[in-house]
Image (cartoon, rainbow, N blue to C red):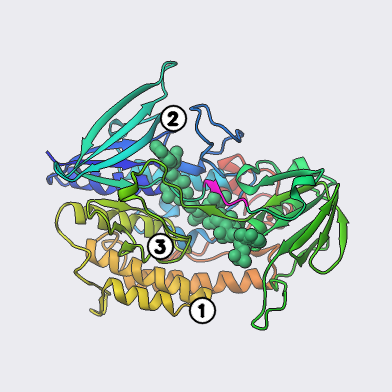
């Protein structure tokens, strides 16, 4: 029997399990599936954990999740076509769910898709994957940490799907003077609770999602001052701010240049006494378990030219990577990719055969790469991932019983347009707005004034999320 290994049971791995489970549910031939997951449960980085540094299994902590995170994009853009938020919660809910509510939805999708827990080896860390050219098999060596005594074992597989995520291993650049800085220095990967920084002056380095979100949260939870320092430049090479409208107490400055004790000097010559520096400098793709011959080396880009169709290893056609691109689209694209990987494994599709969009236009790998090479704006980015998702859905049939893929991605792209506009209008309140589900057509409610993002400090309660638009 053909054997398939899935490494990682976060949102991507869950969709891969669901794709194979669909074969079982339909009574079709299904390979033997073994899932390796180093945590004790499914959910990936949505399993919030206070730990930082080394995890209970002796390996680096996986999760970069923080306590007060709320979705940074509308839930309507990540909704699974075959499982709406309304179906999950039984009613319409607000557009920007707190961490626990988003995790709950992912768990609901897993249950709805009958994700088979018997396939999953929990608490099991994949240490090594090698491919033997003669037998054409992969050997996976993994450590089972569920017992006091760690058990190492090896198994052979015909296909391997890597869904280990790529927001876990931090990029930690060197900055002049950091060595002598007297305050706390850390990466956003280790950020957990914003209230720890109450009354402090904090520097946040970077200008992307983590920098935006940490700066807003630090302000929300009472930091005295937040300085976002970054290297953004205009076409003439001059430093320029991001253009977001921050609350008083948050400001942007040119990249920090030097440090002396607690004092930091920025690129514009200004100086500030600072309690903590948080590097929001992104993450690296990190596959220490993959043998050199099959290693994926890539950057965090919206399309991965290093893979066939952003999914299949160029070194080995039986090795697949899910959701390794940088992301505007998330869960619905992850699921569409998972169904595509499944159909490649089942021999129904090949990556050198162009996919087609709903209008019948062919989309080969080279066409996506041309689109990718010509991207200039955020709309181009989600346009690319939307077209990819549309083609994947059409090729695999995933979600097509619920909605036409073209209508689905057009709706999502339009919602991303609205979200961009709201965020640029006021980055401190975009989460208080509402969008309509593309699947059900239902308009989401807005939170009441007292429950809006800036006032709202109570998150670990699903019922509270459901009532955010009801209670004053
Ligand atoms: P992960 O969620 O990282 O899951 C990977 C799984 O692989 C984990 O369970 C891990 O334990 C397991 N694993 C890793 N290595 C091994 C190994 N060697 N052996 C066995 N198991 C292993 N997306 C959104 O849509 N909305 C958001 O608001 C949002 N916020 C985010 C906030 C943060 C701080 C970060 C870092 C990301 C955010 N994202 C958000 C994007 C995020 O990438 C996805 O939401 C999603 O979690 C990715 O799923 P994944 O399964 O690919 O990876
Ligand atoms: P990103 O989106 O990869 O952004 C990394 C940021 O770090 C980006 O602004 C980079 O600046 C900046 N960076 C990286 N290296 C440096 C150096 N050496 N000096 C200054 N600035 C640097 O990572 P995020 O953590 O924000 O987001 C990742 C995910 O987490 C995302 O899905 C979110 O939803 C949560 P640049 O733009 O290259 O000038």
Viewer-side residue, 319 vs 22? 319
Look at the numbered disc 3 and give the secondary structure of its residue: loop
Q: Position of residue 144 (x, y in %)?
A: 37, 25
The answer as to whether callout 3 falls within 8 Å of ligand 1 is: no
Q: Where is residue 103 in the image (x, y as percent from the top left)?
A: 49, 44
Task: Tell which residue pokes out farthest to the bottom in this image.
Answer: 236
Question: Which image quadrant: the N terminus?
Answer: top left
Q: Give the range drawn in magenta.
A: 168-172
Looking at marks 1 and 2 on the same chain, the residue that comes earlier in the sequence is marked by 2
Q: Marks 2 and 3: which is nearer the front? A: 2
Q: Can residue 46 be seen in this view?
A: yes
The answer as to whether callout 1 falls within 8 Å of ligand 2 is: no
Residue ID at (45%, 48%): 286
Look at the numbered disc 1 and give the secondary structure of its residue: loop
User: Residue 40: which disc?
Assistant: 2
Q: How far apart are marks 1 and 2 (CA)?
A: 41 Å
Q: In which quarter of the image is ligand 2?
A: bottom right
Position of residue 246 relative to residue 85, above or below, is: below
**Residue that badge 3 annotates:** 440
- Residue 171 falls inside the magenta stretch: yes
Callout 2–callout 3 Cβ contact below 8 Å = no
Q: Position of residue 318 (x, y in %)?
A: 22, 51
Number of marks: 3
**Residue that badge 1 annotates:** 376
Look at the numbered disc 2 and give the secondary structure of its residue: loop
Which corner quadrant of the image does residue 122 belong to? top left
Looking at marks 3 and 1 on the same chain, the residue that comes earlier in the sequence is marked by 1
Report whether 218 appears left or right of 319.
Answer: right
């Amino acid at each position: 029997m053909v054997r398939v290994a899935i490494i990682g049971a976060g949102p991507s791995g869950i969709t891969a399990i669901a794709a194979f489970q669909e074969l079982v549910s339909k009574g079709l031939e299904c390979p033997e599936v073994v899932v390796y997951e180093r945590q004790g449960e499914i959910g990936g980085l949505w399993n919030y954990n206070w730990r930082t540094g080394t995890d209970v299994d002796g390996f680096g902590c996986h999760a970069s999740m923080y306590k007060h995170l709320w979705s940074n994009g509308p839930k309507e853009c990540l909704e699974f076509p075959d499982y709406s938020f309304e179906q999950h919660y039984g009613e319409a809910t607000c557009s920007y769910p707190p961490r626990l509510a988003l995790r709950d939805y992912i768990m609901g999708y897993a249950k709805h898709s009958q994700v088979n827990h018997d396939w999953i080896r929990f608490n099991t860390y994949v240490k090594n994957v090698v491919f033997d050219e003669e037998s054409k098999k992969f050997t996976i060596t993994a450590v089972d940490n569920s017992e006091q005594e760690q058990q190492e074992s090896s198994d052979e597989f015909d296909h391997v799907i890597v869904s280990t995520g790529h927001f876990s291993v931090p990029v930690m650049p060197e900055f002049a003077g950091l060595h002598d800085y007297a305050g706390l220095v850390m990466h956003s990967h280790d950020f957990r609770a914003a209230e720890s920084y109450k009354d402090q002056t904090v520097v946040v380095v970077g200008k992307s999602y983590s920098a935006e979100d940490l700066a807003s949260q630090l302000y929300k939870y009472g930091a005295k001052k937040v300085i976002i320092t970054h290297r953004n430049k205009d076409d003439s090479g001059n430093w320029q701010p991001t253009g977001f409208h921050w609350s008083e107490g948050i400001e942007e400055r040119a990249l920090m240049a030097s440090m002396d004790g607690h004092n930091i000097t920025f690129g514009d010559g200004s100086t500030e006494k600072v309690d903590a520096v948080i590097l929001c400098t992104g993450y690296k793709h990190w596959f220490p378990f993959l043998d050199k011959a099959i290693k994926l080396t890539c950057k965090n880009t919206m399309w991965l030219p290093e893979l066939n169709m952003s999914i299949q290893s160029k070194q080995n056609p039986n090795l697949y990577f899910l959701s390794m691109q940088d992301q505007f689209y998330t869960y619905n694209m992850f699921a569409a990719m998972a169904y595509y990987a499944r159909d490649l494994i089942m021999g129904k599709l090949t990556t050198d055969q162009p996919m087609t969009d709903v209008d019948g236009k062919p989309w080969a790998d080279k066409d996506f790469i041309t689109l990718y090479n010509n991207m200039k704006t955020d709309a181009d980015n989600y346009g690319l991932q939307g077209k990819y998702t549309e083609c994947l859905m059409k090729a695999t049939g995933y979600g097509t019983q619920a909605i036409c893929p073209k209508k689905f991605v057009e709706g999502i792209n339009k919602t991303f347009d609205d979200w961009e506009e709201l965020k640029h209008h006021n980055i401190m309140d975009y989460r208080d707005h509402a969008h309509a589900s593309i699947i059900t057509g239902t308009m989401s409610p807005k939170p009441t004034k007292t429950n809006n993002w800036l006032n709202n400090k109570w998150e670990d309660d699903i019922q509270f999320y459901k009532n955010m638009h009801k209670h004053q």
